[in-house]
Each structure stands twice: as structure tokens, then as C-alpha cells.
Image (cartoon, rainbow, N blue to C red):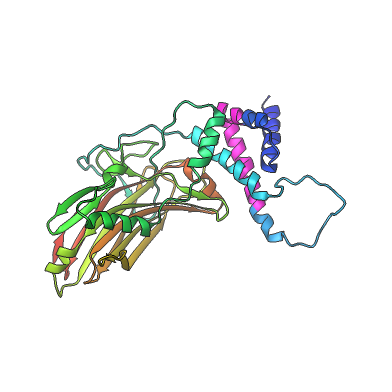
Amino acid sequence: MNQSINEELGHLTSQLLDGEISETDHKKLSMLLANSADNRRTYLEYIRLESLLHWESNDIADTPLAFENSKKFVLLSFPFWAGSLAAVFLAMTAIWWTYQPMGSDNTQSYADHSPTPVSTDSQVGSVAQLSDTAQTPFEKFRDFEHKSFSLQSPSLEEQARRAIEILQDRQSPPQHGIFEYFGPIKRWNRMHAMLTPAENGILPASGSNMMGFEKMAVSVESQTAEIEETVQVLDVRQAIKKSTNEKAKIYAAVKFNQSFGDSQEGAEFGITLQAFKKEESLSPQELVRSDQKLSADRDPSTWNELSSELEIPHDAEFVVISLTARKFGPDSLLANTSSYYADDLELFLTFDNQSTLGPI
């Protein structure tokens, strides 16, 4: 029974990769994937092997071997990207159905701290998820094609510039963030919008909430998957003005974690600190930045800590704090079978290594 289903699944997958699958067979393949987790895992293995075959075939594309008189079956026919992308879309749909997480309330407030174990040599993480309405498998596949492979999310620089514009213009709404004050520091903060309770086998590092990353954007051709989250923007103009001739620095520390999934390797997590200057009628200009990264393990029971620091130039006006999660290689296709999280983000400002403002 299982063998016949696997043979049929392999046949339908080949048709899909060839771009020759009919709508009826397409629906049939979708139903097979929707009704069985084993079918989805088998299908993912087919797609992963075919993707490896496709990527490696580029290295021998110019080999002077031609069989002009034979019409041999080719798994990825021209245009090669059409069948490949359709297969990957369906693969990610299968992943989505298999690993649909519980919903979470992102409006919960911070809670008291009660630390859990921390490992300092590796990291993992987790994701905020989309909700589904009742749809047929074919409709889910069609909608997922437009949702999950969009690479139009703004870059860190674009996110930072938008946040600075919001923070500088007191008349603008905060747009998914809130304004807060810490002495001379004004902050635009969107951490509350990322909060989620324990889920997917991950407990917060402390308290009852943690920050969940959105789904990663996956690029099939470059074999990468990534998500970048701008979490805070600090208006340091008044603080810098009060500390003329003093050296100002910002210190940041954060913990990362990752849930179990089908991927074979942990993600690469990072924290980015950027200092910007904003002049009238001009877009914000980046003055200096610091990027710190770590390679994660796959143990969801421990949180891994990463820290960074940045010397703030005297002409800086804003400091932007961003978090990232990335995956590389064939494993990136399975990135969204895991969820990625951060917790215990702490920031300190120091002036001339004497006075300290924080944690903020």
C-alpha cells in the first residue's frame, strides 16, 4: 500500500517538476500531501534531492556531450525554473500544513524574570506564524505561492530609515511600535508586537514572553533564507548634546533560540547596531555600524547569548538595533519548518566609561 502511494507520489512529483502536471493531478498531489505527514516528508525528500541535482547540474551544463537523436526523459525541462519553483512552493505548503503552530497573543506585557539555562557557544530561534481560514488544499497552495516566497520585505537600512522618520516627526503615528522615554533618550520600540508565550517546545529565557521572528524569506536560486527585524530606534541627540567631549558607547546583549524542524543545521543569528545622522530634507545617513553573528545549535532547551557594542560618533542622532536569523545552502529550503526566537534584549549607554544609562 505504502509502496504504491510512494510510486504515485514520485510520478506526480516528476510531472510537477517537468511542468506537465494537469490541474486534476495537481489537486490529487495536493490531497496526498494534505492527508498524510509521511507523504509530506517523502515529498520534501524528493524535492530536496531534485534541488541538489538542479544546482549541481549547473557546473556541468557546458559539457560537450550531446545526444541529438535521442529524446531522453529530463526531470527538469526548460524553462527549468518553472517546474522547480512550483515544486518548491508546494513543498513549502506541505511544510506549512505539517508545522502549523498555535496562535499567540502579541499584545501581552513583559513579565517578571526567572532565568532558564543559557549556553554561550551556540544559538537557536522561532517565528510568529500566519493564521489560516478554511480552504481546500488547492486554494492553500495557490495562496501560499503569493505569500511565502515574497522577497519584498524591506532591508535593515530601509526599516531603519522608516523608523527614524517616524521618531523624528512627532506628528507621525508610531506604526507597529510605541514611543518611550528614558531620561534624555526617546525610543521607538516594537518589541511588544513580536511577543509570544512559550510555543513549539521553546520556553522564554525569562518571564512568560519572548520575541518571535516572522517567517524567513527563502531564495531558491541563491540557497539562502533570512529574516531581519528592526526592534528599536533610539533618539540620542539630547544625550549626546549633554555629554560633549565625552566618548559615548552603546552595549547590547540578547539571547536566541530555535525550535526543532526538518533542517539539519542551526541558524546563524545576529545583532546589528547602526548610528545615523539625519539632516533636513535628506534621508538618514549611516555613520557607523557593528554586526555580530553566531552559529546556532539545534538544542531548544538552552538559550545562546550574543553581545555587541558600538562607539557612537558625536554627530550621530539615532541608533538602530536590529536582529537577524539566516540559513544557507540546501538546508535553507527547510528553514520555515523551525521557528526562531530572541529574548532578554538589554541595552546600556555609557559616557566616557563613567556614567551609565540603562538597561533601556
Vertical comparison of 154 with 144: above or below = below
Q: In this view, does 355 lie above or below 300?
A: below
Q: Quadrant of the C terminus?
A: bottom left
Res. 240 in view: yes
Which residue lies most toward the top here? Answer: 1
Which image quarter holds the N terminus? Answer: top right
Predominant secondary structure in magenta? helix
Q: Residue at x 40, y 36 (%)?
A: 200
Can residue 47 be found in the magenta stretch? yes
Q: Which quadrant of the figure has residue 101? A: top left
Q: Nearer the viewer, residue 166 or 225?
A: 166
Quarter of the image for residue 67 reads bottom right
Residue in view at x 15 percent, y 64 percent: 239
How many labels sit on residues? Answer: 0
- Percent position of residue 345, x then y: 27, 51
Above or below, 166 against 339 in this view is below
Residue 342: percent from left, percent from top = 33, 48
Q: Is residue 209 above or below residue 162?
A: above
- Whether the magenta-drawn stretch holds residue 89 is answered as no
Q: Can residue 358 be seen in this view?
A: no
Write the residue at 83% across / 47% down.
71
Name which quarter of the figure residue 137 lies in: top right
Task: Please give the range of residues in magenta.
Answer: 30-54
Question: Residue 138 location, x and y as percent?
Answer: 57, 30
Work out whether residue 71 or residue 348 is closer to the camera in this orientation and state it. 71
